[in-house]
Amino acid sequence: MRSREQYIITKDQVHDYANEWLSTSLKLEYRGRKCTAETLLQILLIAAARTVSIFAACRDLADAPCDQTIRNALEASLPDIAELERRLNLSLHTNLPKALFRKSRRIAIDLTLIPYHGQPHQDEKEIYRSAPKSGTTHFHAYATAAGMHKGHRYTLALLHVEYGTKMKDVVQQLLKIIRSRGVKIQYLLLDKGFFSVEVVTYLKRAGTGFIIPAMARGRKPKGRRKATGLRALQQKKNGYYRHTLTGKGGGKPRSSRVTICVASKSYTHKKTGKRRTKKLLFVIWKVRLTPRKIREMYRTRFGIETSYRQMHEARIKTCTRDSRLRLLFVGIALVLRNVWVWLHFQLAVGKWSENPQLFLELLRFREMLRWISQVIGGLLGDDQRQGIEYEEYRKLAANC
């Protein structure tokens, strides 16, 4: 059995892993008089680690180029959206555990909308429209696919979604990416934004099992008038029911015969404080679980809320209109989160010394970012001491 000291990792190793994951696939090729590709990557990493803008990161580093130099370097070195997506997806797959590919995995597919208050950079389609949030109906949209290994969520694919893009095409592209890397799919858990006849029909034809929350449609019950459509199923007991979904796909009327799972959810009413029950509907195919299991599995969804919170903790702040930069900043945040998850399965042998070191079991995501910030700050003229220092870690480790 390994001792605790065999699970210690240094802050320099943490930085090197993050640097390797990004530099290997991102390939930012730039060499100017004041800035190199390596310096550019370090600025991006420290801005992400501190959740600040490029301007703020350069301002706080004595030996860093000015923010305008960094922006010029990014403008010159970044490829188009399609190529940048490809490189970021390669970075996401760097050093993934081999065990992740040995058996079929449940894959969660989600749509993330980041509020945007500006104008498009080049094309109106860059801005996604949706229901109001944070005072706007305009967003930059990103679709992700994630798989589970030993209780941890790895992001396996990332796409920038333009306004007007069919959700079927988004799902198709995500599945193409993860299958090209050798990931086997048990079944999909999709965000409610993917609920449509077109997506359901495509997945059935592709032979891929799925669970999608269904939005109740149809006439509401009123007096003697009965509910119709999916609303009628909300009146039924927990179980499975056959139903024909109707809608449009490719501009034509479509229909698909599916199984609807009805599951109950108990909650406390905010005003009365009383317990109430709500019926949830899920469209399922090639999934054999009890209604309760389906509800519980979808509710947790691999810790999706935690994943998005952590992504925003490492997303560089910006007001740019350039979709490439925004995609890059989201991609870097997701790569850093993959690094953090991977580190919990990577053994680093070492002993307590003059340099602060860390038990992996104590490595929280926010703390990993502070360590990266501290290393790069030391390289580029910033001596801020961030995070828990060595003595505090030793006390924590001794009490574990």
Image (cartoon, rainbow, N blue to C red):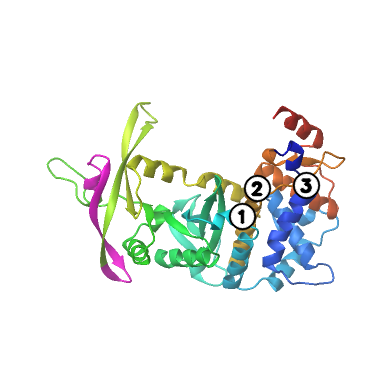
Q: Give the residue type that dot 2 points to.
A: Phe
Distance of label 1 from label 2 (alpha carbons): 8 Å
Q: Tag on residue 345?
A: 2
Residue marked by disc 3:
11
Decide which of tag 1 and tag 2 comes sooner along the chain: 1
Q: Tag on residue 97?
A: 1
Q: Quadrant of residue 76?
A: bottom right
Q: Give the residue type that dot 1 points to.
A: Pro
Position of residue 222 in the picture relative to residue 20 (left or right): left
Q: Tag on residue 239?
A: none
Q: Which residues are magenta?
A: 231-253
Determine the secondary structure under disc 3: helix
The quadrant in which the C terminus is found is top right
Relative to 377, say whether 2 is above or below.
above
Q: Position of residue 354 (x, y in %)?
A: 87, 40
Q: Residues within 10 Å of mark 1 (few under 14, many from 20)?
A: some
- Residue drawn at 28 percent across, 63 percent down: 247
Whether residue 59 is visible here, answered yes or no, is yes
Determine the secondary structure under disc 1: loop
Relative to 18, say whether 68 is above or below.
below
- Residue drawn at 52 percent across, 55 percent down: 146
